[in-house]
Image: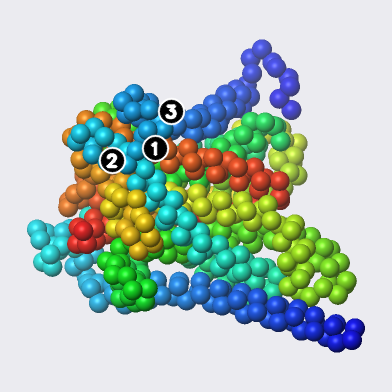
């Protein structure tokens, strides 16, 4: 329809071509934001990378910014502990709930419960943090730790993991449900008509088909947990030591970045080290995201975005 | 014997079925009760302190120690900052989604790559956006201010807004576009006069979703917004937002 290239294109045609160029540019630039972010963080973290090699930054323990020693091991360990605890708590619950809502419950019940899960997804992380401070921390201090014969301040890896678990639940459930819904009904019918029970059908037929998608959902939840800052920071204790049990305080990477904004510019290389931490976080999350998006783009799904 | 065996295995299946059914119902109830617990905690602990002066006054000296004043500065700060960021993000995401769905060839590599990039950006944690905003601030010589916060939050909500808008514009039936072309409209006119009008409700939803994500976020603003007890009067002044206020007050009380 725009084929006729007259020597003096009218204003409308000019607007059409001009807008195409502009919009094309906007699309390209917006797609490059990802690379821009990575590059900006890398550029700023070069000074600390010049001081210490990449492996020694990751694996050394000492964290003494004023002496120029930056060992990220305690923070990486803290992140892994908190994320691990969160996933151990959240995974079975998410799996069971999404199976229940898709395979077992009536449509009415599902439509009743969905908004509640959406609300859970929409609660700001500060509010989760407050909840953790008011409920989880006293609960661990007063009941859970004494139960195991340990005295704990309540500000510990377990508290961070429990708060995080609640935060990843809506994300994982939402995506797993979408994945389970893509399993064709014929498969279920065939299995049931062979005399399998409902649970056998779920276990051997539906789950086998949906497994890659479910794994992707879990990985997306994991990467979400990896970068969560405020809520974890408020309950996890923030002690720069490698935690030895779930009742020890930890200090995850995002909390490190957020907590030291004040001193950042007063100590040399400190800002560089913190932006290196951000780069580290970004690379891990990018990796997780790219892998799980690739798995998910194989299955047909939509409406996975979250507020 | 065979019959007995069948009965026993049937029993085993029935038991397994029931055990898992109970577990599933229990985990669903657990999630619902955690939600109620969170909402209940906030309402019960917070409601008694809500007063008129709290939402109509800026904090006076010593407000956070129990003296007079309110949190008007953070309420307005949140609205200014997120409003500005939403407008900035909209100025990028509307053209991008229109290009992807009206101008570009369907299923071209550019379309696929752009969607993928936004999906991946959606997963980047807000603290990383905060750090990125901080590097931008250093680059442009900006101080922690309303403007810097707006730009950072705009980056944060851009993927959410773009992808949710994209899902809506994708649903526009192709015959609508064809009818518009058949009447001699250019793609520019089709995109901005036909498609935008058709998906207006969807665009508003996307904008609201993005606004909701932006207004609740604190991690990206810790470096970039600064903090103040007064209401900002220019883009270059520091600003307080509600999540930041909550975060700073609580973390200072509980070391």
Residue depicted at 32% across the width and 70% down the height: A150
Q: Residue furthest right?
A: B2
Alpha carbons under labels 3 and 1: distance apart: 20 Å
Q: Which of B216 and B124 is in front in this view?
A: B124
Q: Where is residue A35 in the image (x, y as percent from the top left)?
A: 49, 30
Q: Between label 3 and label 1, give the one nearer the viewer.
A: 1
Instruction: Determine which quarter of the picture holds residue A275.
Output: top left
Kindly indicate the quadrant of the structure image that contains residue A133: bottom left
Measured as percent of width and height from the top left, residue A222 is found at 51, 52
Residue placed under numbered mark 3 in the picture: A39
Rendered-image quadrant of the N terminus of chain B: bottom right
What residue do we see at 68% from left, 52% from top? A212
Say which of A5 and B26 sits in front: B26
Which residue was labeled with disc 1? A58
Distance between mark 2 and mark 3 Cα atoms: 27 Å
Residue behind mark 2: A62
**A43 relative to A259, above or below:** above
Q: How crowded is mark 1: few (under 14 residues within 10 Å), some or many (20 or more)?
A: some
First in residue order: circle 3 vs circle 1: 3
Q: On what subunit does the disc labeled 1 rest?
A: A
Q: Are marks 3 and 1 in contact (CB under 8 Å)?
A: no
Q: Is residue B45 above or below residue A156?
A: below
């Amino acid at each position: 329809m725009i084929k006729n290239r007259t020597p003096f294109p009218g204003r409308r045609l000019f607007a059409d071509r001009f807008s195409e160029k502009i919009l094309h540019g906007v699309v390209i630039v917006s797609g490059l934001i990802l690379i821009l972010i990575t590059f900006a963080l890398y550029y700023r973290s070069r000074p600390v990378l010049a001081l210490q090699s990449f492996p020694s930054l990751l694996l050394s323990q000492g964290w003494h910014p004023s002496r120029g020693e930056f060992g990220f091991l305690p923070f990486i360990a803290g992140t892994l502990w908190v994320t691990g605890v969160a996933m151990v708590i959240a995974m079975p619950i998410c799996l069971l709930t999404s199976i229940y809502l898709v395979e077992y419950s009536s449509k009415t019940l599902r439509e009743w419960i969905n908004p509640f899960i959406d609300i859970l997804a929409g609660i700001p992380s500060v509010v989760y943090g407050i909840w953790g401070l008011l409920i989880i921390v006293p609960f661990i201090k007063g009941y859970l730790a004494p139960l195991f014969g340990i005295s704990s301040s309540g500000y510990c890896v377990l508290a961070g993991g429990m708060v995080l678990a609640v935060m990843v639940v809506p994300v994982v459930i939402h995506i797993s449900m979408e994945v389970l819904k893509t399993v064709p009904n014929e498969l279920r019918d065939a299995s049931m008509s062979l005399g399998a029970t409902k649970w056998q059908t779920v276990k051997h037929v539906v789950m086998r088909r949906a497994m890659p998608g479910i794994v992707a959902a879990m990985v997306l939840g994991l990467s979400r947990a990896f970068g969560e800052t405020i809520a974890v920071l408020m309950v996890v204790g923030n002690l720069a030591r490698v935690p030895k049990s779930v009742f020890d305080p930890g200090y995850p990477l995002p909390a490190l970045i957020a907590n030291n904004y004040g001193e950042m510019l007063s100590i040399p290389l400190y800002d560089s080290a913190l932006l290196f931490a951000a780069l580290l976080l970004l690379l891990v999350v990018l990796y997780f995201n790219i892998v799980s998006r690739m798995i998910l783009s194989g299955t047909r799904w939509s409406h996975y975005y979250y507020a | 014997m065979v019959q007995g065996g069948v009965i026993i295995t049937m029993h085993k299946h029935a038991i397994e079925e029931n055990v898992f059914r109970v577990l599933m119902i229990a985990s669903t109830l657990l999630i619902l009760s955690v939600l109620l617990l969170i909402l209940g905690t906030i309402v019960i602990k917070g409601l008694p302190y809500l007063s008129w002066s709290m939402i109509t006054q800026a904090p006076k000296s010593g407000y956070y120690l129990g003296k007079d004043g309110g949190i008007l500065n953070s309420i307005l700060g949140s609205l200014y900052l997120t409003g500005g960021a939403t407008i900035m993000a909209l100025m990028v995401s509307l053209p991008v989604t229109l290009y992807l769905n009206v101008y570009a060839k369907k299923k071209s590599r550019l379309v696929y790559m752009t969607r993928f990039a936004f999906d991946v950006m959606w997963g980047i944690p807000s603290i990383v956006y905060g750090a990125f905003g901080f590097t931008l601030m250093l680059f442009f010589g900006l101080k922690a201010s309303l403007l810097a916060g707006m730009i950072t939050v705009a980056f944060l909500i851009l993927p959410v807004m773009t992808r949710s808008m994209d899902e809506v514009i994708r649903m526009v039936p192709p015959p609508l576009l064809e009818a518009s072309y058949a009447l001699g409209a250019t793609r520019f006119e089709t995109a901005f006069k036909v498609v935008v009008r058709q998906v207006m409700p969807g665009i508003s939803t996307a904008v609201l979703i993005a606004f909701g994500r932006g207004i609740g976020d604190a991690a990206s603003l810790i470096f970039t917004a600064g903090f103040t007890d007064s209401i900002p009067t220019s883009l270059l002044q520091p600003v307080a937002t509600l999540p930041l206020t909550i975060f700073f007050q609580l973390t200072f009380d509980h070391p």
